[in-house]
Amino acid sequence: MIFVTRPDLPELNDLIPYLERLWHSRVLTNGGEFHNELESSLCKYLGVKHISLFNNATTALLVSLKALEITGSVITTPYSFVATSHSLLWNGLNPIFVDISRTSFNIDVEKIENAITEDTSCILAVHCYGEPCETERIASIADKHNLKVIYDAAHAFGVRKNDQSILNSGDLSVLSFHATKSFNTFEGGAIISHDITTKQKVDSLRNFGFQNEVTVSDVGINGKMNELNAIIGLLNLDQYSANLQKRAVIANLYNIGLLNINGISIPSINLSSDSNHSYYPILVNSSFKLTRDGLYDLLKKEGVFARQYFYPLISSFPMYSKYKSSAPDNLLVANLIANQILCLPIYPSLEKHNVERIIQIIRDIH
Ligand code: T4K
């Protein structure tokens, strides 16, 4: 079986000296040496000021909303992993879904202002598949309406725009280091903040709300990353650039192999030289010989497990469908894309002959 992704792993031999140090120190979590080293290495690698590591991105999303004291309703996208919107409900906030762009699959900036209500306090946008949102335009809307901006950057590790890390946009950004992501710590995540006061608040919320040994100042959570995950992160960071090259080679093979197939379109993120190639989405439209689901099934029969990220839309899950903004006629593009999307396998150890086989299966149908 070829899966949509396979995690990058460090060499076992490289892991052993770290494990020996860990066993010797017996500092397993709560801000140990590997955790702190990973925070500073990531700041340097990503080009950001402050990073707070988390046990996963979902907890980091919960904390980001809490840290900015978001209230009322939040403008967001229905085209994401369900954790994006779940973070709102966990904070007692109401999602307002806005349709997405046909080309980037990110929130459609043209439609944000119309969706803002009196109790809107924040925009929670997603850099979907690592494609940067229109951050300048979102910033000017947010300034005009006095809104905070949080970016769910779960897919956007290492992505840069205008020679700057995309993570420097908005008030906070959240990364995921889940096993399926282009940079992984098995499970993990992070919040990027731009000033030390915000980082300290995030760090305290990540640790139950403790200010010091005897003072708890807020309803925090246990969101800490442990030392084992941090070690995996340090080792995976060493090989990230080499792995990115391998992903780019695979994306290029698909880009060439899937060119000019009637009914298959290749979104711009796959063609961008700034992409981190964490996903390889294609759109299967009605001029293709099979439906999207038909192609998914056929690939599966051939041992290729592609994924329909993101179908169904978040807005169609029962806990979200009751919101007014979930109405399909408010989310026409998102519904269209969700029905056509298919993410093909992409990961550094995916062999060339397997990529060629996937391309051939699709070409043969054509
Ligand atoms: N925001 C956005 C925009 C996100 O996409 C996500 C997560 C989050 C927030 C929340 O981040 P975390 O709290 O997870 O840090 C996966 C991931 O679980 C999830 O992290 C990810 N997005 C989402 C898009 O995909 P599944 O249920 O589709 O993954 P799963 O377990 O089916 O794995 C996919 C394939 O990867 C498998 O078929 C085989 C392969 N795989 C997976 C794992 C876990 C492996 O080979 N080894 C592994 O250990 O959700």
Image: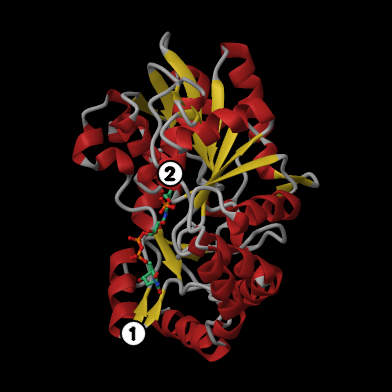
| 294 to the left or right of 284 | left
Residue under pointer 1: 303
Q: Nearer the viewer, residue 75 or 360?
A: 75
| 234 to the left or right of 178 | right
Say which quarter of the image contains residue 98.
top left
Which numbered marker is on residue 223? 2
Q: Residue furthest right?
A: 163
Point 37% across, 36% down: residue: 87
Contact check, label 2 and label 1, Cβ < 8 Å: no
Q: Nearer the viewer, residue 26 or 286?
A: 26
Q: Secondary structure at mark 1?
A: loop
Name the quadrant of the C terminus: bottom left
Identify the amino acid type marked 2.
Gly
Residue 85 visible (yes or no): yes
How far from the left and from the top, in percent, is residue 339? 34, 54
Point 39% across, 68% down: residue: 288
Residue 259 visible (yes or no): no
Identify the amino acid type marked 1.
Gly
Q: Nearer the viewer, residue 21 or 49?
A: 21
How far from the left and from the top, in percent, is residue 112? 50, 24
What's the distance in space between the residues labelled 2 and 1, CA to CA?
37 Å
Of the four image quadrants, the one with ligand 1 is bottom left
Q: 10 Å neighbourhood of mark 1: few (<14), some, or many (≥20)?
A: few
Of labels 2 and 1, the one closer to you: 2
